[in-house]
Image: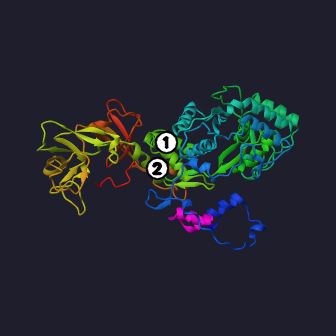
């Protein structure tokens, strides 16, 4: 415990020590269980061996300037000792796994099918768009399989036809592949509807399921009353279940329930319910559909999944998972739970995102102010950055809630290496150089990546009329102000010239609309206090500047936001700049192309762009203050 605490404190120097200790104690208890009498015996003291220097972990500077350990990829973490899962075929060694007389024979058959290969699955419900929390699940499921030479299925949990749409199926697969993963197979729970129905009949025959007529509200909540139909004769339940299948019961009039009590005290979970909704794949063939509690473990069994990786809220279903496979004498995988990943200043609930869309607070599921994966792609977040973020979060038992700026730090790290530099001006101020040194425009070579000029240059025209940011000029200087002002010249980034104000032109209302300046070669002029960006012969573009969609960290928390999440919307979450200017090096850019606009931040080309006008989304700001030189 001392070693664990020491390592945790060294990594989390900013955190409260007592909070760290409580979390370490909780996770160790979860992993090892309560102490035994042997644990409580006093151990003889031994001399502590000093760790070899080579084994000490490297210390790196993280985004906020504090010390932390070097980030390992999630793949590296999963290859190591971070997770000591059972080996394929050794399911019975897992704590809580129920061994029956048929277990070993079923495991032997399982190994014959898989060849001892690790098999995982990512099983989203196709009733909405994936969000940042799903990125962790994708990385975990696909990453664990890859780290162990295994395969991962993409399985759609399409058992609720009322809420499922084709666009969600397409978007889910697109996002999995966008993050860099290829499913071993794409399957659907509906692929197995016939087999699941056959097993439901068998469950009734074995006396482990029955048809119930209690209403939904009667069986909800903790420790609901037992069903008066629990001891219904098998033959009667078989006939009634067939009537359910034939549509002789209305919705809510009958369900098929399984005879077990789950960890959370809920008795007899529902296996099938009546829904008169056509299914996108099976049409009108079925009017009864299986539930998650019934479907999930059996689909895992059919696909010979070795490790069923679920978020912590499904821990309460682990007993039904093992019970159902064993009740039917089929191969039983092992369910493992891990903590969810949440972000502050956002909502990820599908129901709430739909409300945001319906009220016009956001344009759609891919609005860049959201944290759905389609929104993050549209905003310009690289998939590698999202995967790196998931790796930094790691695989923990406890739920992890992160600040958005930690994700943005991962984005900056990737884009700094990937996004070529360009010059852009968001609020243009016209500048005329009265002593321009050439009769026509000069070509200025701008490095695509100033830190590594071997990665090429692009040409930018430089002529007597240029445009700078309005905020880079002041008529009166404050103390510490370093940019352009009367009597204070500035350098032009990459141009090799210093400009000085000669004349200020204003409109009738007194606003500055143009500057007349003189220029001097940088090598003969006094060194200026600052260098500013500029454009010449630019393209007109639209720029969308995004801030947080919500004002409070937890917009769903009634204690923090009593009026509900819709009352917490940030009125300044989107600012559209219609007539920004950008240099012509971006002319051939395509949707999702990314650039660093020098001193402004990282920007991505939006799919709304046309041949007549480019549209850019601000991805993230630069680490430093854009106002500084």
- For this rendering, which residue is in front, 117 or 33? 117
Residue 10, magenta (yes or no):
yes
Q: Which residue is mark 1?
A: 383
Q: Is residue 380 above or below residue 8?
A: above
Label 2 residue SS: helix
- Marks 2/1 in contact by CB < 8 Å: the verdict is no
Q: Please tell me which residue is depicted at 47% across the width and 41% down the height of the picture.
A: 375
Confirm whether residue 253 shows in the render: no
Residue 541, magenta (yes or no):
no
Relative placement, left or right, of 488 versus 17 is left
Q: Is residue 541 above or below residue 218?
A: above
Q: Please tell me which residue is depicted at 84% across the width and 31% down the height of the picture.
A: 239
- The span picked out in magenta is 3-22
Q: Please tell me which residue is depicted at 72% across the width and 73% down the height of the picture.
A: 44
Quadrant placement of the C terminus? bottom left
Q: Which residue is mark 2?
A: 410
Quarter of the figure with residue 400: bottom right
Relative placement, left or right, of 137 versus 67 is right
Percent across and percent down for residue 45 are 69, 74
Quadrant placement of the N terminus? bottom right
Percent across and percent down for residue 598 are 31, 47
Quarter of the figure with residue 577: top left
Relative placement, left or right, of 273 versus 533 is right
Which secondary structure type mostly characterizes the magenta part of the structure?
A: helix
- Mark 2 or mark 1, which has the lower sequence index? 1
């Amino acid at each position: 415990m001392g070693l664990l605490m020491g390592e945790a404190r060294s990594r989390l120097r900013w955190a409260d020590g007592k909070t760290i200790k409580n979390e370490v104690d909780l996770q160790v208890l979860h992993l090892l269980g309560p102490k035994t009498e042997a644990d409580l015996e006093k151990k003889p003291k031994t001399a502590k061996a000093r760790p070899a220097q080579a084994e000490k972990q490297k210390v790196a500077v993280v985004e906020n300037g504090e010390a932390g350990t070097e980030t390992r990829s999630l793949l590296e973490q999963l290859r190591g000792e971070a997770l000591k899962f059972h080996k394929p075929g050794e399911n019975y060694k897992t704590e809580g796994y129920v061994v029956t007389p048929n277990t070993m024979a079923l495991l032997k058959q399982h190994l014959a099918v898989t060849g001892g290969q690790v098999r995982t699955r990512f099983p989203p419900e196709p009733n909405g768009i994936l969000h940042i929390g799903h990125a962790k699940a994708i990385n975990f499921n696909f990453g664990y399989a890859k780290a162990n030479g295994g395969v991962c299925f993409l399985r759609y949990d399409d058992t609720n036809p009322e809420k499922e749409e084709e666009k969600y199926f397409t978007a889910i697969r697109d996002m999995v592949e966008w993050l860099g993963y290829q499913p071993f197979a794409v399957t659907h729970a509906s692929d197995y509807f016939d087999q699941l129905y056959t097993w439901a009949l068998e469950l009734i025959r074995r006396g482990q399921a029955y048809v119930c007529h209690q209403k939904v509200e009667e069986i909800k909540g903790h420790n609901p009353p037992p069903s008066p139909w629990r001891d219904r004769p098998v033959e009667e339940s078989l006939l009634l279940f067939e009537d359910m299948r034939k549509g002789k019961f209305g919705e809510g009039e009958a369900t098929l329930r399984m005879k077990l009590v789950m960890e959370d005290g809920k008795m007899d979970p529902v296996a099938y319910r009546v829904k008169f909704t056509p299914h996108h794949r099976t049409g009108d063939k079925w009017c009864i559909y299986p539930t998650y509690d019934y479907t999930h473990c059996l689909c895992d069994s059919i696909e010979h999944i070795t490790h069923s990786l679920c978020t912590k809220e499904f821990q309460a279903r682990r007993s039904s998972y093992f019970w159902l496979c064993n009740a039917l004498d089929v191969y039983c995988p092992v369910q493992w739970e891990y903590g969810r990943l949440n972000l502050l200043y956002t909502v990820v609930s599908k129901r709430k995102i739909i409300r945001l869309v319906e009220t016009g607070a956001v344009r759609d599921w891919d609005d860049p102010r959201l944290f759905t994966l389609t929104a993050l792609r549209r905003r310009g977040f690289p998939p590698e950055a999202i995967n790196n973020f998931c790796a930094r979060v790691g695989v923990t038992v406890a739920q992890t809630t992160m600040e958005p700026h930690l994700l943005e730090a991962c984005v900056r790290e990737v884009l700094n290496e990937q996004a070529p530099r360009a010059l852009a001006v968001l609020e243009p101020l016209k500048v005329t150089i009265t002593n321009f040194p050439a009769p026509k425009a000069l070509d200025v070579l701008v490095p695509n990546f100033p830190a590594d000029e071997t990665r090429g240059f692009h040409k930018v025209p430089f002529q007597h009329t240029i445009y700078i940011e309005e905020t880079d000029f002041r008529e009166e200087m404050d103390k510490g102000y370093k940019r352009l002002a009367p009597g204070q010249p500035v350098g032009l980034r990459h141009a090799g010239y210093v400009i000085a104000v000669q004349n200020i032109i204003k409109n009738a209302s007194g606003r500055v609309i143009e500057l007349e300046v003189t220029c001097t070669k940088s090598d003969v002029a006094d060194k200026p206090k600052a260098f500013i960006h500029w454009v010449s012969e630019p393209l007109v573009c639209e720029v969308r500047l995004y801030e947080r969609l919500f004002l409070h960290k937890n917009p769903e928390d009634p204690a923090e936001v009593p009026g509900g999440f819709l009352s917490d919307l940030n009125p300044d979450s989107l600012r559209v700049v219609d007539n920004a200017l950008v240099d012509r090096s971006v002319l051939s850019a395509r949707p999702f192309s990314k650039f660093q606009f020098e001193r402004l931040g990282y920007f991505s080309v939006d799919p709304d762009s046309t041949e007549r006008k480019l549209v850019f989304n601000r991805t993230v700001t630069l680490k430093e203050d854009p106002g500084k030189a």
